[in-house]
Amino acid sequence: MSTLLAEYSGFSEPASSPLLLLGQGRDLASERGVECTGELPAPSDPDLVDRARAARAALGTRAFVLGHHYQRDEVIDFADVTGDSFKLAREAAARPEAEFILFCGVHFMAESADILTSDQQQVVLPDLAAGCSMADMAAIGQVEEAWAVLQDVGIADSTIPVTYMNSSAAIKAFTGRHGGTVCTSSNAEVALRWAFDQVGGVDGTGKVLFLPDQHLGRNTAVLELAMSLDECVVFDPRKPNGGLTDQELRDARMILWRGHCSVHGRFSEQNVTDIRAAVPGVNVMVHPECKNEVVTAADYVGSTEYIIKKLEAAEPGSSWAIGTELNLVRRVARAHPDKQVHYLDSTVCFCSTMNRIDLPHLVWAMESLVEGRMVNRIVVDADDAHWARVALDQMLALPGI
């Protein structure tokens, strides 16, 4: 068992699956060919923690601190609310008295908070380098060129765009302009059914352009809407015509953008096979951003909130292997020492961009606000904000949301 994880009761790695820590190994067989270099910073020193407490106290109700589930513990300790990206954006909107929203997450999340909050509120991202590799895989220029391809093929009028929450404000705005909606990993099925209903229903011939995560789109279409893998095609923006023939585009029902999560894309079907062999009776639970073969091999599939709640309700003594970001897995394992929790992959990279938000950056942002200096404010273009809000409001209007 890794010494890093041994301190957490109930959290273990099988001996046959040694954990490769940051800076101590690489896995070129993963979807992106990830090599981890360097180590995460050492735990914060007591002085920095004291400075964080003092700055937070000085800001009082003027500030509201949001912490995404994938954040480091040292940051979560100062969050007023923790959750997934959309939950946090809505929490911010529900606090109109808060002048400053400090979003400890990544850039697209802070954009969503700026869209949903009032003009009197200012959203701060402690480190502007905290982006999202998935969101960055769909640039607005590429998406507009892809839509032009669909127009040339004659299928744009029968295609509804649906974008995952993990996308830029510009992509959300594109979706709103073209009559589409936004979805989360929790409501993707409802969003896709609504989208297909706009063009003849799931059993018809209409299409959905799903951005930017191909795996969530494919898994939802196949596992929840009973479509076949053959009805799903991947549009590669780096290739002419998306790497597809006109006929392939006409025959497709789900046009999936060639994007993915660099963390969830790492998990493999072999990981599932290995953990089942090493831990008899283990329950395998993964995020729907994982590849289709991983999701099919797992016992449970769901969003971050689903994973947290499922483990909370699990029987004491049960064994679980979880395929999602390591900070979250460590945290839920520590919260449930009566259960055996394993990390599904043997090679670990934290979400590198999410981990750019550390306590030094948070302290700097808060102390700057105390001194009357605004830093790293996130402001979405007014037109993009309008159309992104249209797409978000359409999601909120979906049944059961």
Image (cartoon, rainbow, N blue to C red):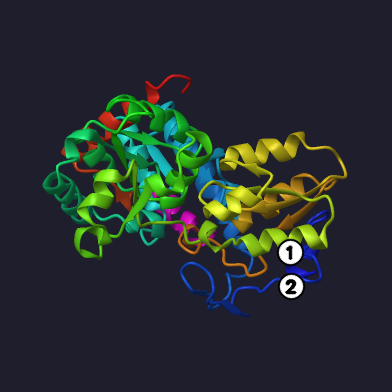
Q: On residue 274, which mark appears?
A: 1
Secondary element under disc 1, as helix, strand or loop, is: helix
Q: Rate crowding at label 1 as few (under 14), some (14 to 19) or many (20 or more) other CA atoms within 10 Å.
A: some
Instruction: Choose between 271 and 354: the one closer to the eye.
Output: 271
x, y percent for residue 173? 23, 39
The count of marks equals 2
Front-lying residue, 57 or 66: 66
Q: Amino acid at mark 2?
A: Pro
The residue carrying pointer 2 sits among few (fewer than 14), some (14 to 19) or many (20 or more) residues within 10 Å by Cα, namely: few
Sequence order check: which comes first, mark 1 or mark 2?
2
User: Is 248 positioned to the left or the right of 104 in the image?
Assistant: left
Local secondary structure at mark 2: loop
Q: Is residue 46 visible?
A: no
Q: Residue furthest right?
A: 317
Whether 117 is among the magenta residues is: no
Which region of the structure is painted magenta?
A: 357-370
| Outermost residue, left side | 152
Q: Amino acid at mark 1?
A: Asp
Q: Find residue 365 and name its label.
A: none
On screen, residue 375 above or below 399? below
Q: CA distance from mark 1 to mark 2?
A: 12 Å
The percent position of residue 114, horizontal first and vertical second, equals 32, 39
Residue 49, image x and y in percent? 60, 56
- Residue 316 coordinates in the image, percent (x, y): 86, 40
Closer to viewer: mark 1 or mark 2: 1
Rendered residue at 33%/29% (across/down): 204
Q: Which residue is mark 2?
A: 18
Residue placed at 52% from the left, 46% from the top? 68
Is 361 covered by the magenta stretch? yes
Q: Main secondary structure of the magenta part?
A: helix
